[in-house]
Image: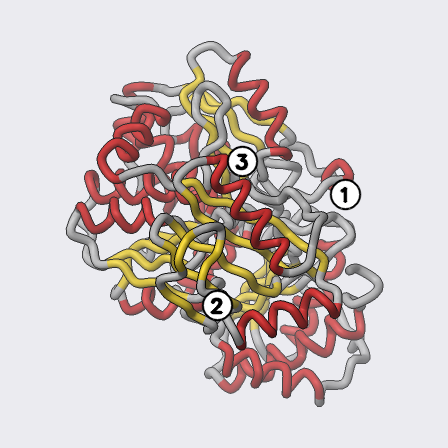
């Protein structure tokens, strides 16, 4: 939280640790970016100054920047890495710093090295002139993404799309990309509001109510999309305003890419992503690998081209051909391609579910108190043999507790970004999903959960 866990002295120490690690990697340019949160630009200027004082070259955007733009800039400029001031989808009182290496992201060993360097770093702010140069990182990202996508299809159809920026850094970027491709875009919450209207910029079903109402009002709308605070996550709604789950949206994206692109690699998915995506990928002859939660597990596969597409349970999607990190704007562009001509988004999903079976997935958050944490530890030591009336067919404790069932799964784990325990589940129907999530929370001893499932 800004002013508590996240303070300027801690930020300066972390940046000094990161810049020391960048020097160990050979030095060079460091992309510095920030989102639309309170004081984010001011802190980014200080970060850029620390980068310069470390003997590196800060490359700072002229305005708030989506995280995908920063990652793409690292790839295009062959920079040594990036430092992004953002708390992504978290509430407005939060702030954070994302560190990316030259290949996108950092692994656990690299993170530990940076933490060690930061612990030894002095935290006083050096004096000196502030960096004057700023760069148009948004414009280059827009041009390169437009070239990657199929503008002819959108230009012919000129589909109506409603985009909810949630007052985040995607405003002026995602809508510009879609407009340049030929779509007619109506933007919601495109103004910069540092507190995001008092709500977390997280595109959950509940947070997308205005988007849903607007889709029902706009005649001929084909698609609704929303991105989170730094635009690396997305949500999709069909023309009726119905929200797709992350699994459903990923299934449509994988199917569309497999049909329209010559994919050279496989598909990497998190263990909490529903089976529909895997079935769609396999039907196109694409190998699928499963990984613990967190995009850091996907980046090596995307960089090596072992996987070309990657997706997770929280609205993350990546296409390694563009850059190796999740990108909500890229996902929005590909979905716009898919609905520009031919079947609607709802029809595409229905066809996939008829062929491969339905997959209803969701998550809820339970309080992370000592009692619940101990119950989770006990369940990991002695996993149950049956859950929700189903026999447990497989158990993994690599990333929390994952229980494989004949008709889905149940997963319990501590959040890596918030002080909560998360319950993930997949089931054949919405009613079954709601019951399974409740059973998972009950295993943790919780009777009250937060409805953060999408």
Q: Position of residue 1 (x, y in %)?
A: 77, 60
| In the displayed structure image, the side of residue 40 where residue 406 appears, left or right | left
Could you say which disc has been placed on residue 226 in the image? 3
Q: CA distance from mark 3 to mark 2?
A: 24 Å
Q: Position of residue 418 (x, y in %)?
A: 68, 60
Q: CA distance from mark 1 to mark 2?
A: 27 Å
- Residue in view at x 60 percent, y 78 percent: 19
Q: CA distance from mark 3 to mark 1?
A: 17 Å
Q: Is residue 314 visible?
A: yes
Could you say which disc has been placed on residue 195 in the image? 1
Location of residue 141 with respect to 394 vertically, above or below: above
Badge 2: how crowded within 10 Å, few (<14), some, or many (20+)?
A: many
**Residue closest to the far right:** 3
Q: Earlier in the sequence, mark 3 or mark 1?
A: 1
Location of residue 28 with respect to 324 vertically, above or below: below
Q: What is the secondary structure assignment of the residue under circle 3?
A: strand
- Residue in view at x 73 percent, y 71 percent: 11
Badge 3: how crowded within 10 Å, few (<14), some, or many (20+)?
A: many
Q: Earlier in the sequence, mark 3 or mark 2?
A: 2
């Amino acid at each position: 939280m800004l002013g508590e866990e996240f303070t300027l002295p801690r930020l300066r120490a972390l940046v000094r640790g990161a810049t020391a690690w960048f020097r160990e990697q050979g030095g060079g340019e460091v992309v510095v970016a920030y989102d639309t949160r309170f004081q984010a630009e001011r802190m980014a200027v200080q970060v850029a100054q620390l980068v310069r004082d470390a003997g590196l070259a800060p490359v700072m955007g002229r305005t708030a920047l989506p995280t995908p733009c920063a990652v793409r800039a690292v790839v295009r400029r062959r920079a040594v890495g990036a430092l992004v001031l953002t708390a992504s989808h978290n509430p407005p009182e939060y702030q954070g710093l994302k560190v990316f290496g030259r290949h996108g992201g950092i692994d656990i060993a690299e993170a530990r090295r940076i933490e060690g360097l930061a612990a030894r770093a002095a935290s006083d702010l050096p004096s000196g002139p502030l960096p004057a140069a700023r760069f148009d990182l948004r414009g280059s990202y827009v041009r390169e993404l437009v070239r990657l996508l199929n503008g002819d299809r959108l230009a012919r159809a000129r589909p109506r799309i409603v985009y909810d920026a949630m007052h985040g850094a995607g405003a002026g970027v995602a809508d510009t990309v879609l407009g340049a491709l030929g779509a007619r875009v109506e933007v919601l919450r495109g103004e910069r509001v540092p507190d995001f209207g008092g709500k977390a910029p997280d595109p959950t079903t509940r947070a997308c109510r205005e988007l849903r109402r607007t889709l029902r009002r706009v005649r001929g709308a084909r698609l609704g999309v929303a991105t989170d605070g730094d635009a690396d996550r997305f949500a999709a709604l069909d023309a009726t305003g119905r929200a797709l789950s992350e699994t459903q949206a990923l299934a449509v994206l994988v199917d569309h890419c497999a049909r329209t692109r010559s994919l050279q690699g496989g598909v990497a998915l998190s263990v909490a992503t529903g089976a529909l995506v895997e079935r769609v990928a396999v039907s196109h002859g694409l190998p699928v690998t499963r990984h613990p939660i967190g995009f850091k597990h996907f980046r090596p596969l995307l960089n090596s081209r072992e996987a070309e597409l990657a997706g997770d349970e929280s609205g993350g999607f990546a296409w390694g051909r563009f850059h190796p990190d999740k990108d909500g704007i890229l996902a929005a562009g590909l979905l716009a391609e898919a609905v520009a001509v031919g079947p609607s988004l709802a029809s595409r999903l229905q066809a996939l579910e008829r062929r491969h079976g339905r997959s209803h997935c969701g998550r809820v958050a339970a309080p992370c108190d000592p009692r619940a944490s101990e119950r989770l530890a006990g369940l990991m030591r002695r996993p149950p043999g049956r859950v929700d009336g189903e026999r447990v067919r497989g158990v993994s404790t690599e990333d929390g507790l994952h229980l494989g069932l004949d008709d889905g799964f149940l997963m319990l784990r501590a959040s890596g970004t918030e002080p909560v325990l998360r319950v993930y589940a997949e089931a054949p129907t919405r009613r079954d999903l709601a019951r399974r999530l409740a059973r998972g929370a009950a295993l943790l001893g919780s009777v009250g959960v937060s409805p953060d499932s999408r």
